Amino acid sequence: MKLGMVGLPNVGKSTLFNALTNAGAESANYPFCTIEKNVGIVSVPDKRLDALAKMYNPVKFTPATLEFVDIAGLVKGASKGEGLGNQFLGDIREVDAIVHVVRCFEDDNIIHVEGSINPKRDIETIDLELILSDLDMIDRRIDRTKKLIKGDKKYVAELEMLEALKEHLENGKPARSFPFDEDGLAAIRSTPLLSQKPVIYAANLSEKDFTDSIDANEHYRQVCEIAAAEGAVIFPICAKLESEIADMDAEDKAMFLGELGLEESGLDRIIGAGYELLGLMSFLTAGQPEVRAWTIKRGTKAPQAAGKIHTDFEKGFIRAEVVSFDDLMECGSMTAAKEKGLVRSEGKEYVMQDGDVVLFRFNV
């Protein structure tokens, strides 16, 4: 999973990126501090994997990973190449989902590129640039489809969909809120649209607002209204606090979060939101050589899940020996789970479930 962190200059994007990834990206109080994209790889926390490691004491422990991309700040006119626009739009095409950091704190010492704090304006600025970029692509696609219709009338429905999508975009609405049907989604798949990317809004609050009165912050409420209208994910975060806990050990971090009344860090919440937004889950493989988590789409069948490990596993798939994580933990060992009949033999049509502990049988 690759998440692109975007936002206007000086909203706290790079500060949050550094806190989440410990990547050491430069962060400063001036626009375009981020010029080249920064990339950070983080391990996905999974208590199930920790429990399996205690059970097997493996030689190798491999959690799933998440890639954060800190993308250059954007300004008006990016779709026409203003500022670092072309680079911004190119970088954002490569990510699976967008984490849009929105400034919801007041601080006279940290300048805002627009001179004031206004989340609605900031969100619209970025959405507009993505929409304008998409409109250019849709115009080209419409021209191409009109030519195809002359030889094959089957493209008439596609043209109607594209023209309706163009009107939707021209009304300032992102492609992610367009009511695509299955045929429309299939038709547009070859034209990746930036405003169709799933979005997580990270509302960056001051330490005081984050710990005392989140809902009293009018800027945060504004972002909540926008997210609700789009069906997007939103959660409050304080980049400054995340920076403070980034270097703490697990025990101190848990204590600090507990004092704030939080069960999870910002990183854990973003990962959870990302998995939910993209429809992802993990299956597990366990043994003395290695305990490992594998990320797949919900609805993935056993042979395709096996292919995540190695293509030969999918080609020569015979069966999957599956036990749920909870059943394995309750039994205390794979041997005990087998004796109780809890290890199932599943075939090619088995749909993988979150937390399945699997051994794939294959023959090549």
Image (cartoon, rainbow, N blue to C red):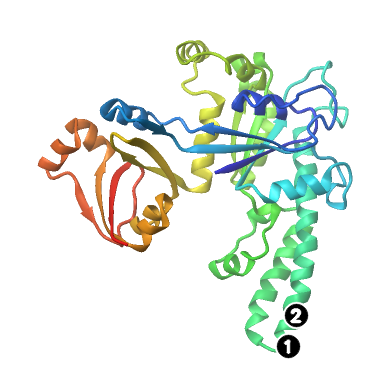
With 114 as the anchor, is 274 left or right in this view? left
Of residues 300 and 277, the one drawn nearer to the viewer in this rendering: 300
Q: Against 214, is 174 above or below? A: below
Q: Looking at the figure, which quarter contains the C terminus?
A: bottom left
Q: Against 189, is 305 above or below? A: above
Mark 1, secondary structure of its residue: loop
Residue drawn at (86%, 43%) of the image: 76
Q: Against 111, is 285 above or below? A: below
With 343 as the anchor, is 274 left or right in this view? right
Q: Are marks 2 and 1 in contact (CB under 8 Å)?
A: yes
Mark 2, secondary structure of its residue: helix
Q: Residues within 10 Å of mark 1 (few under 14, many from 20)?
A: few
Residue drawn at (45%, 30%) of the image: 45
Percent x, y of residue 24:
68, 24
Q: Residues within 10 Å of mark 2 (few under 14, many from 20)?
A: some
Q: Amino acid at mark 1?
A: Lys
Q: Quadrant of residue 196?
A: bottom right
Percent x, y of residue 262:
50, 19
Of residues 137 and 202, the one drawn nearer to the viewer in this rendering: 137
Residue marked by disc 2: 146
Residue drawn at (64%, 32%) of the image: 202
Q: Say the numbered circle drawn on residue 3.
A: none
Q: Looking at the figure, which quarter contains the N terminus?
A: top right
Residue marked by disc 1: 150
With 138 as the anchor, is 153 left or right in this view? left
Of residues 265 and 43, the one drawn nearer to the viewer in this rendering: 43
CA distance separating discs 2 and 1: 7 Å
| Residue 10 appears in the figure | yes
Residue drawn at (40%, 55%) of the image: 307
Q: Amino acid at mark 2?
A: Lys
| Residue 171 appears in the figure | no
Percent x, y of residue 26:
75, 25
